[in-house]
Amino acid sequence: MAVIDLNADLGETVDGVPTGDDDAMFAVISSASIACGGHAGDAAAMRAAVERSTATEVAIGAHPSYPDRAGFGRTRLAIASADLRASLDAQLSALAAAGADIRYVKPHGALYHAVRDDAAHAGAVVGAVAALSARLGRAVPILGLDGLIAAEAARAGLPFRREAFLDRGYLPDGALVPRGAPGALLHDPGQVADRAVRLARDGVVEAVDGTLLDTGAVSLCVHGDSPGAVEMARAVRRALDAAGIAVAPPW
């Protein structure tokens, strides 16, 4: 039987106000990437997300970002690697202090994309995850797209797991279509569900020009704050169940 992970970015409160319906998303996913305060989230939101994860038996991942609450972590920052490392250490520690059993780390937003080609920032992420791994006594995987971050993780002896996005458009080189550009976001639950089944079965996703990309993904993401996120996630879960594809975390 094919097995795939289904994750969502959750706990993304801004000024105490949730940006998505976390309760509904927890009911259908197998892993939750929880905001750690860099772009969104706070101590109360982290504790609530940890409690929901425990109640629903959903694996917990950390979702740290550039320290950029004003821009929701979607702006690439020219920040010194030492300062970024300090921020990431603080974010991971905050989630751990909320009681999280952190099973993986997935950078958020602009940082997620920057670590594909920025060696200094990739090194800061890997250094923070390596320090977390040392504290936990086990190697914590990093979740993301191919790039320098994968090589940095390998050098540090950390597992790197590949992810595919169900509600984002892809460029032919495997990068995501920039937000705001045509084709960046997918909204149709049926289309997103079909993409999920194809990814789980064949590991491929179609780029905006028709190119088929081999993702190697073990985890599929639906953004928790996307318009119609709950409807898309439910459609994906129904389609995976109907296709006989098990939904379970790989960590």
Image (spheres, rainbow, N blue to C red):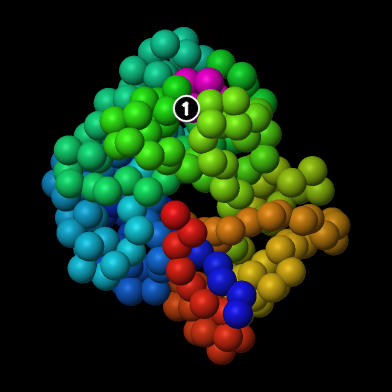
- Using the image as rendered, state which of residue 223 and residue 60 is in the foreground: 60
Where's the N terminus, which quadrant? bottom right
Query: Which residue in the protein does label 1 denote?
Result: 125
- Residue at the (61%, 75%) spot, across then down: 2
| Quarter of the figure that contains the C terminus | bottom left
Horizontal side of 165 relative to 14 (left or right) equals right
Rendering quarter of residue 93: top left
| Residue 102 percent across, percent down from the top left | 32, 46
Within 10 Å of disc 1 (Cα), the crowding (few <14, some 14-19, many 20+) is many
Is 236 in front, or is 217? 217
Percent x, y of residue 176 = 66, 46
Residue 124 lies in the magenta stretch? yes
Compared with residue 172, is residue 185 higher up or lower down, i.e. above or below?
below
In the displayed orientation, state which residue is furthest to the front.
Answer: 137
Res. 1 in view: yes
Q: Would you say the magenta stretch is mainly helix, strand or loop? A: helix
Q: Residue at position x 40%, y 19% from top?
A: 85
Kindly identify the residue that appears in the image at 53 percent across and 31 percent down: 157
Q: Amino acid at mark 1?
A: Val
Span of residues in magenta = 122-126
